[in-house]
Amino acid sequence: MKQFALLFRQPSYDINAKPAEEIRKLAIKWKEWIGGIEEQGKLKSGVRLVDNGKVLKSEGVVSDGPFVEIRERLGSLLVVTAENLEEALTLAHGCPALDAGGSVEVREVLGSR
């Protein structure tokens, strides 16, 4: 079994500006979708990221990030197990980020074979 990272990118927006009921429904969708992967025994780990951070570039240049001009943000990621890329992509279907115009990037984790 290999490990794959599912990276969730969503359009940038202020979650706090959304109505509480919409936030609650979205949280339920995420919980149910991730729960389905967990029930299959395919969930390894996952993390949710805060909206801000720093970016380190060559020559020690540090800047604030993510940047205002970026139209989508990396909000969270899961690590799942799958036989191959196609199976990992199948697990990504149904992700709530897709409902909001986002995307799921699926990449094999190095050294997971």
Image (spheres, helix red, strand yellow):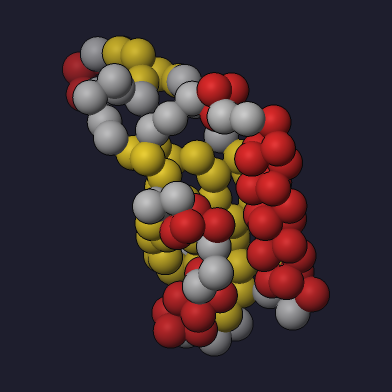
Residue displayed at 47% across by 57% down: 99
x, y percentage for residue 51?
Answer: 49, 25
Location of the N terminus by quadrant is bottom right
x, y percentage for residue 7?
Answer: 46, 53
Query: Position of 34 compared to 9: left or right?
Result: right
- Above or below residue 37? Residue 53 is above
| In-front residue for pair 27/36 | 27
Residue displayed at 40% across by 18% down: 54
- Above or below residue 63? Residue 58 is below
Query: Position of 108 compared to 66: left or right?
Result: right
Residue 112 visible in the current orientation: no
Query: Position of 61 compared to 43: left or right?
Result: left
| In-front residue for pair 64/16 | 16
- Above or below residue 13? Residue 94 is below
x, y percentage for residue 57?
Answer: 25, 23
x, y percentage for residue 50?
Answer: 56, 27
